[in-house]
Each structure stands twice: as structure tokens, then as C-alpha cells.
Image (cartoon, helix red, strand yellow):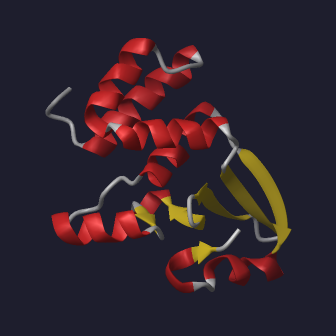
Amino acid sequence: MDELDELELLELLCRRAKDIGKLSGEDLFILYKRFGDRLIQALKAVREGRVRLHVFKPSNRKLWTVIGKHGEYVVFPGALFCGCDNFYFETVRRLKPHLCYHLIAQRIAELLGIYEKEKHSDEEYDFFVASPMWKRNV
């Protein structure tokens, strides 16, 4: 599994976890070896209910957020983007997308179905994406 990039590894192990309903101890160890403290922070965010799926009606647009240390960050998992500083600086430094703990938490939460779901009107959508770097203060 060492040849897999971070995203491929996370996706593979989360799909396996979805099939059995949990992340096995062995898979957690593999993820920890790759992600270190980012995994610990991600699992804590999932456990504490800080991963949220916002559904806007009537359009049915969906937006993921993860509450972090300094605010609530909008996460675009399909684009591998997070509004946090760690994502920005590590992506610039590496010249490729970086999986911050918010992105890791979102993937784990979505694939295992462990997240808060909130409904909003379409008029509220702009509020979620209007702040600089897609971060809302909470």
C-alpha cells in the first residue's frame, strides 16, 4: 500500500470500512502511519460531530463543512480543496493538493455515514461561500 498516494489509500480503506461498518485496527494503523496526527484530528472531528453536510433547498445543492480550530471550513472533496491555512500552505509547498485533516475527516464521515446533516434555503448558500478562503467563524 506504500505505492498508493494519500487519497487512493484513504479511499481504499474507507470503502473497506464501509463494507464492514467500521475502520479495523489494522486499517487505522495503516492510515496513522501515512497521516500521523492528521488522522487523529480527523477522527476526533468525526467523533465530535464537527463534519456537516449542508443541503440547500429547493435546488438540492450540497456543501460540506468541517469545524476546525479557527472556524468552520468549507470543504470541496471533489476538487480536493479546503479553506484552511494548512491546506493552502502545504499545497503551495508541495505543488499538489494536500489532504488536511478537514478533508480526511470529510471522506471518513461521508463514506461511513457519520456526519450532521443540516437543511437551509437556497438564499443562505452565498453566506457559506462569501467569506475569504471559504472560512466561517463559529
Q: Residue at x 62, y 59 (%)?
A: 64
Q: Is residue 53 left or right of residue 10?
A: right
Toward the front, the furthest residue is: 69
Q: How many marks?
A: 0
In the foreground, 135 or 110: 135
In the foreground, 53 or 59: 53
Q: Residue at x 57, y 66 (%)?
A: 70
Q: Is residue 88 left or right of residue 14?
A: left
- Quadrant where the N terminus lies? top left
Q: Residue at x 48, y 57 (%)?
A: 77
Toward the left, the furthest residue is: 3
Quarter assignment of residue 22: top right
- Quadrant where the C terminus lies? bottom right
Quarter assignment of residue 12: top left
The reply to whether residue 95 is visible in this rendering is no
In the foreground, 16 or 72: 72
In the foreground, 49 or 8: 49
Rendered position, 13 above or below 91: above
Residue 9 position within the rendered picture, expressed as x and y whole percent measured from the top left? 31, 34
Rendered position, 92 above or below 103: below
Residue 85 position within the rendered picture, expressed as x and y whole percent measured from the top left? 40, 70
Rendered position, 134 above or below 25: below
Q: Is residue 7 left or right of residue 51?
A: left
The reply to whether residue 85 is visible in this rendering is yes
Q: Residue at x 36, y 53 (%)?
A: 99
Residue 44 position within the rendered picture, expressed as x and y whole percent measured from the top left? 57, 38
Residue 92 position within the rendered picture, expressed as x and y whole percent measured from the top left? 23, 72
